Image: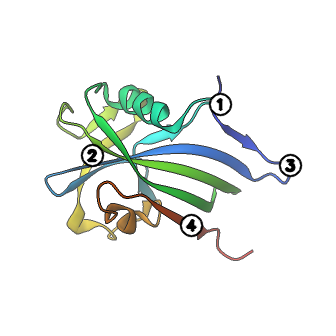
């Protein structure tokens, strides 16, 4: 199996992704490997891989935690530009309980350049954090599911 990420004929990168919403004690677990923005842990789904399985795999690969529980909170269709390219990303965002995490900050096990850290929820909006609909996604009541569309491509 390979990452479900490929260039479309027009050059747009098409990506299926899982994102992991881990909130504890008023803090959100985020990845910092780019000086311009933060994003949620997770990554590309593999071809033929269901999203729940991908969420468990990504969480285990990044944190080593196998005890977490996962609940789908939302699906995000995300359009943006990165590295000079247009992206069309569909993300499945799972709430997660990660009680066995090492104290952040710590490097993601599968990407030492990515530091996982706790961001106080009170600081949301003080620096770019993606997906852009994250504040609304965090407000989805447990047990409910929402669909979001974000478009950060800028002028076309």
* Residue 78 image point, x, y percent: 58, 60
Taking 109 as reference, is 100 left or right? left
* Residue 42 image point, x, y percent: 44, 40
* Eye-nearest disc, 2 or 4: 4
**Residue at which label 2 appears:** 117
> Is the residue 34 above or below the residue 2 in the image?
below
**Residue at which label 1 appears:** 47
State yes or no: discs 1 and 3 in contact (Cβ < 8 Å).
no
Earlier along the polypeptide chain: callout 1 or callout 2?
1
* Eye-nearest disc, 4 or 3: 4
Q: Secondary structure at mark 1?
A: loop
Label 4 neighbour load within 10 Å: few <14, some 14-19, many 20+: few
Q: CA distance from mark 1 to mark 3?
A: 19 Å
Residue 111 vs residue 58, the one in the foreground? 58
Taking 123 as reference, is 132 left or right? right
Where, quadrant-wise, is the N terminus in this rendering? top right
**Residue at which label 3 appears:** 9
Label 3 neighbour load within 10 Å: few <14, some 14-19, many 20+: few
User: Who's the residue at 62% across and 52% down the image?
Assistant: 89
Quarter of the figure with residue 77: bottom right
Earlier along the polypeptide chain: callout 4 or callout 3?
3
Taking 5 as reference, is 139 left or right? left
Q: CA distance from mark 4 to mark 3?
A: 22 Å
Q: Residue furthest right?
A: 9
Q: Secondary structure at mark 2?
A: strand
Earlier along the polypeptide chain: callout 3 or callout 2?
3
* Residue 141 image point, x, y percent: 30, 62
**Residue at which label 4 appears:** 149
State yes or no: discs 1 and 4 in contact (Cβ < 8 Å).
no
């Amino acid at each position: 199996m390979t990452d479900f990420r490929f260039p479309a004929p027009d050059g747009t990168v098409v990506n299926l992704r899982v994102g992991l919403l881990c909130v504890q004690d008023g803090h959100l677990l985020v990845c910092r490997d780019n000086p311009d923005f933060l994003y949620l842990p997770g990554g590309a789904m593999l071809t033929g891989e269901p999203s729940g399985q991908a969420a468990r795999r990504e969480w285990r690969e990044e944190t080593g935690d196998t005890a977490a529980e996962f609940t789908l909170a939302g699906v995000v269709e995300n359009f943006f530009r990165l590295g000079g390219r247009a992206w069309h990303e569909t993300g499945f965002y799972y709430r997660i309980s990660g009680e066995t995490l090492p104290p952040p900050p710590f490097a993601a096990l599968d990407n030492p350049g990515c530091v996982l850290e706790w961001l106080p929820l009170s600081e949301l909006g003080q620096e770019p954090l993606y997906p852009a609909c994250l504040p609304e996604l965090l407000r989805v009541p447990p047990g409910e599911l929402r669909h979001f569309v974000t478009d950060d491509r800028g002028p076309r």
